[in-house]
Amino acid sequence: MRLGGCHNFHDFRMMAKRRLPGPIFDYIDGAADDEVTHRRNSESFERCDLVPNVLRGVGQVDMSVTVMGQKLAMPVYCSPTALQRLFHHEGERAVAAAAAKYGTMFGVSSLGTTSLEELRKRHDTPQVYQFYFHKDRGLNRAMMQRARDAGVEVMMLTVDSITGGNRERDLRTGFSIPFKLTLAGMLQFALKPAWALNYLTHERFRLPQLDAHVDMGGGAMSISRYFTEMLDPTMSWDDVAEMVKLWSGQFCLKGVMSVADARRAVDIGCTGIVLSNHGGRQLDGSRAAFDQLAEIVDAVGDRIDVIMDGGVQRGTHVLKALSLGAKAVGLGRYYLYPLAAAGQPGVERALGAMRTEIERGMKLMGCSSIDQLSRENLRFR
């Protein structure tokens, strides 16, 4: 399959599967336990139908939105994800460049493989920094200061990952960072020599945001130990309130799923929340973000920017979320598969397809701007 033959999420996924060694593909593709929540994320959109209006004179379509003070040319952004240069040597550089081309926001993870500073110098599009809460409070403050010095616009604290999810696909293959592959896992790498050649002939794989703490050669700490030993499971609302005050800017909590937590986020001064179950990779059996969206928007949507991610594969999925009141929608696997398949051209093709689908969908819905989308356009079965 060639990139020109990829027209949707499933095409990109198949192309990535053909290129990547099995353990790495399964790391992107897999989720926790029985992967029930992962499947529900996309299925949740199928229980909701669009009700279009016609004869509305839709000539030009404005799909721009403003979320957490950032003006985006389209209502989707590239969520921060870890280890991107493991999937393709261009990694975050490809994602940031594609996001800049389409005038939208991109995120950089604490477990990112390109530095905040490099990406900030390359692109002036809005940048999110996703970080985890550590037992070492000094490290937390230092990471925030580094982001501020780099010119990051939005801080995004992940709150649903105080411990790692049970990802059984990784256990079967032995996938870890550094690699500790099972015999079956090593065989799958041997079947994809092109990936290995690409990996070995480009710059060393590293985690520049955490170089002093997590070592890819196994010297300091593996990523699994990073989650179990360095992150603080006792993180509380008081801890986060202190960080919000310290940052004194756009601050978002990623992984909020209940109305009670959404209200607390408002109370401590957050400017955004991302409804998310981490792509089904943490608590299996948890609810889909789309299914939680309406009640959380009703509770706090007039006081904080409500965003969602999880399972988004089509422009119509985005339109459904916006109609329920989401200010924007995060993409994860949607851009990771094309990144793995083809680097920057792959991410650009995927974002271009999403933009085209959203524009087409808005025209067919009879809407010329995002603010014309409403719950009147939806029916749930």
Image: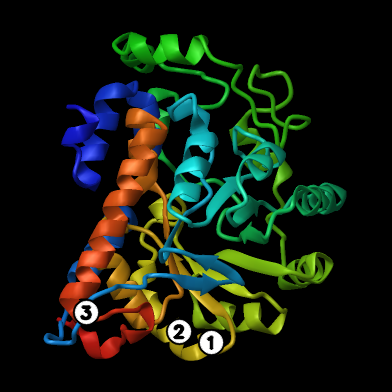
The reply to whether dot 2 and dot 1 touch (C-beta < 8 Å) is yes
Disc 3 to disc 1, how far (Cα)? 31 Å
Residue 58 got which mark?
3
Residue drawn at 43 percent across, 70 percent down: 64
Compared to residue 173, the image places residue 331 above or below, namely below
Please indicate whether residue 112 sits to the left or right of residue 18 in the image: right
Instruction: Quadrant for the N terminus, please.
Output: top left
Residue drawn at 22 percent across, 62 percent down: 43
The reply to whether dot 3 and dot 2 touch (C-beta < 8 Å) is no
Q: To which residue does mark 2 refer?
A: 297
What is the three-letter code of the residue carrying label 3?
Val
What is the three-letter code of the residue carrying label 2?
Val
Q: Is residue 29 visible?
A: no
Q: How dense is the environment of label 3, judged by Cα within 10 Å: few (below 14), some, or many (20 and up)?
A: some
Label 1 secondary element: helix
Residue drawn at 24 percent across, 32 percent down: 3
Compared to residue 2, the image places residue 288 above or below, namely below
Q: How many marks?
A: 3
Instruction: Quadrant for the C terminus, please.
Output: bottom left
Q: Is residue 98 visible?
A: yes
Label 2 secondary element: helix
Q: Quadrant of residue 193?
A: top left
| First-in-chain label (3 vs 1) | 3
Q: To which residue does mark 1 refer?
A: 300
| First-in-chain label (3 vs 2) | 3
